[in-house]
Amino acid sequence: MIKVLLYALPLVLAVYALVDCVQTDESQVRGLPKLVWVVLIVLVWVVGPVTWLIAGKQRQPGQLRAWPVTPRAGGGPARPTRPLAPDDDPDFLRSLGGVDRDQQRLLEQWEQDLRRREDDSSDDRDPGEDGGAGGRPTSDPPAS
């Protein structure tokens, strides 16, 4: 397992750095021309990708943060301006609303169909069929 990681991790790192380099705009590449960075990433195992990730791309301050943060009142720690999890994000939950409305409409149709079938089956039955007492016997069992 460790042997696999020794080869897989540098390969994953190289692929990530290569894709990042190719997708980076030419104006954000620092130090060397983009083509030289690609050759460096491909030919120099581990050192090339790490060098690209550290020094090859011009990064904006705070670019690595997932969400912008706002300071808390009273000087507490900063909190994200957006929810971190999808189930805490009201916009995400609202986007799921269409699915919920469809499910609600199907449930209502199913309930209406069930009520209609129950009404149809109660009209077809003879009132004396079930003994007139909802399936209970009308007389007491004989004493032994």
Image: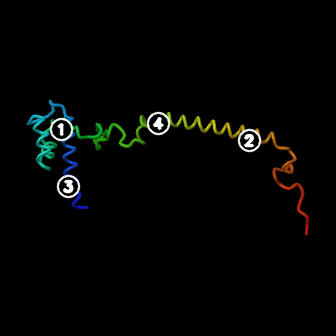
Secondary structure of the residue carrying numbered label 4: loop
Q: Residue at x 45, y 37 (%)?
A: 93
Secondary structure of the residue carrying numbered label 3: helix
| Residue type pointed to by label 1 | Cys
30 relative position to 126: left or right: left
**Is 12 or 116 nearer to us in this picture?**
12
- Identify residue for label 2: 118
104 relative position to 34: left or right: right
Does 141 appear above or below 51?
A: below
**Is 39 or 109 nearer to us in this picture?**
39
- Identify residue for label 1: 21
Image disc number at residue 96: 4
| Residue type pointed to by label 2 | Glu
Sequence order check: which comes first, mark 2 or mark 3?
A: 3
70 relative position to 143: left or right: left
- Identify residue for label 3: 7
Secondary structure of the residue carrying numbered label 1: helix
Sequence order check: which comes first, mark 4 or mark 3?
A: 3
Residue 2, horizontal then vertical, whole percent = 23, 61
Tell us which disc is closer to us: 2 or 4.
2
Colouring scheme applied when the structure was drawn: rainbow
Sequence order check: which comes first, mark 3 or mark 1?
A: 3
Sequence order check: which comes first, mark 1 or mark 4?
A: 1
Sequence order check: which comes first, mark 2 or mark 4?
A: 4
Sequence order check: which comes first, mark 2 or mark 1?
A: 1
Tell us which disc is closer to us: 1 or 4.
1
3D distance between C-alphas at marks 4 and 3: 42 Å
| Residue type pointed to by label 4 | Leu
3D distance between C-alphas at marks 2 and 3: 67 Å
3D distance between C-alphas at marks 3 and 1: 21 Å
Secondary structure of the residue carrying numbered label 2: helix
**Is 97 or 89 nearer to us in this picture?**
97
